[in-house]
Image (cartoon, rainbow, N blue to C red):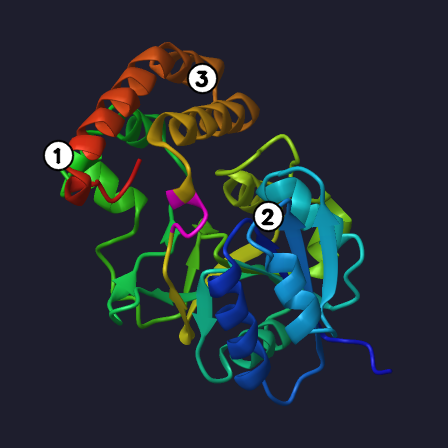
Amino acid sequence: MTKPILSIIIVNWNTRTHLKWCLRYIYTRTKGINFEVFVVDNASHDNSAVMVEKNYPSVKLIRNQTNLGFAKANNQAIRQAKGKYILLLNSDTKITEQALVKMVRFMEENNKVGILGCKLLNPDGTLQPSCRQFPSLFSQVIILLKLHNIFPNLKSIRNYYLLDWPHDTTKKVDQVMGACFMVRQEVFTKIGLLDKKYFIWFEEVDFCRRAAKAGWSTYFLPQAEVCHEKGASFNQVLSPKKQAWFNKSVLRYFRQHEPLISYLVLLNLYPTSMLLAIIAQALHSIKPSKKKKYL
C-alpha cells in the first residue's frame, strides 16, 4: 500500500452526528492524494465509536476509557501517523471541495512552513476568524474579566483576533485555530508532540510558539475553506467548568512563555473569572437565548 501523504486525526467526544458528516465530507471531497484517517474517541457514550466501525471500517479507531482531553488524545494518533503532513481536525467541521488537497499542495511548495491553517466559515457562510496574535497579558486580562463581550471593538481585542485585515490573502501569522491545524511531520520530530498538560485550550498556541522558536513559520491559507459549527463538544459542558479549563491552560501558557509577573497577574484574576462564569451560567439558565459568544 502506498504511504499516505496526509494523516487526518479527529478527536471525538459525544459528537456522533457531527463526526459522521465530517468523515463523509473528507472521503467525498478529497481526491488525488493518499490519506489515512484516525478517530480518537474520548469515552463517548453516544455510540460514536460504533458508528465509525460500522460506516467507516478503514478509519483507524482509538477508543479511550476516559476523556483524555484534546492534546493527549491527538498525541495518541500522531505517534501512529504515517503521513508527511498531519491534520488535526475538529469533528464539527465540513471540508469544502479539495480543501485538504490545497493545503497539502501549499505545504509541498513552501518547505519552511511548519503549520498551516485554513479559512474557517460559520454554517451560514460568514467568516469565522481563525488566526490570532500570540496572547498578550492585556488581551487575556480583558478576556478573563469578560470585557470583550461588553466592548468587542477594543483595539487590543481586535488586534489579538486579527479582525482588521482581509481574510482573502495568504498570510504569515502567529497562530491558527486547532479546528483545522496542519503540521509538517518534521516539526513534531524536531520540537515534540502537543503538551499533554493542556487538557483543552492553548495546546495549539503553545505548539505554534514552540515551532516559531525553532524557526518554523505558521501560515493562513484562505483558498482552503472549511465550515466549522463550533462548540459541538463544549456545549455539553457548563460554563464554570469550561472557565476552569481555560484558566488552567492560560496560566500554563504564561508560566512557560511569558514573564513571571504576567503569570502572577493572571493567577490573581482566577477567582474573579470563576465568579463571573458562575454568574453567567446562572443568567444563561434563566435566559438561554442570551448566551455569549465566548467564555
Give whichever of discs 1 and 3 has the lower sequence position. Answer: 1
Three-letter amino acid code at the position of disc 2: Ser
Q: Identify the magenta region.
A: 231-235
Three-letter amino acid code at the position of disc 1: Ile
Q: Quadrant of the C terminus?
A: top left
Alpha carbon of mark 1 to alpha carbon of mark 3: how far? 24 Å
Instruction: Say which residue label 3 marks.
Output: 263
Instruction: Say which residue label 2 marks.
Output: 44
Q: Is residue 7 visible?
A: no
Image vertical order of residue 7 relative to residue 199, above or below: below
Three-letter amino acid code at the position of disc 3: Tyr
Q: Is residue 146 visible?
A: yes
Instruction: Say which residue label 1 marks.
Output: 150
Does residue 201 show up magenta in the picture? no
Q: Quadrant of the N terminus?
A: bottom right
Q: Is disc 1 placed on a helix, strand or loop?
A: helix
Q: Is residue 153 left or right of residue 4?
A: left
Q: Is residue 258 left or right of residue 290?
A: right
Image vertical order of residue 61 relative to residue 56, above or below: above
Q: Is disc 2 placed on a helix, strand or loop?
A: loop
Alpha carbon of mark 1 to alpha carbon of mark 2: how far? 35 Å
Give whichever of discs 2 and 3 has the lower sequence position. Answer: 2
Q: Nearer the viewer, residue 18 or 144?
A: 18
Alpha carbon of mark 2 to alpha carbon of mark 3: how far? 34 Å
Comparing labels 1 and 3, the label whose residue is closer to the camera: 1
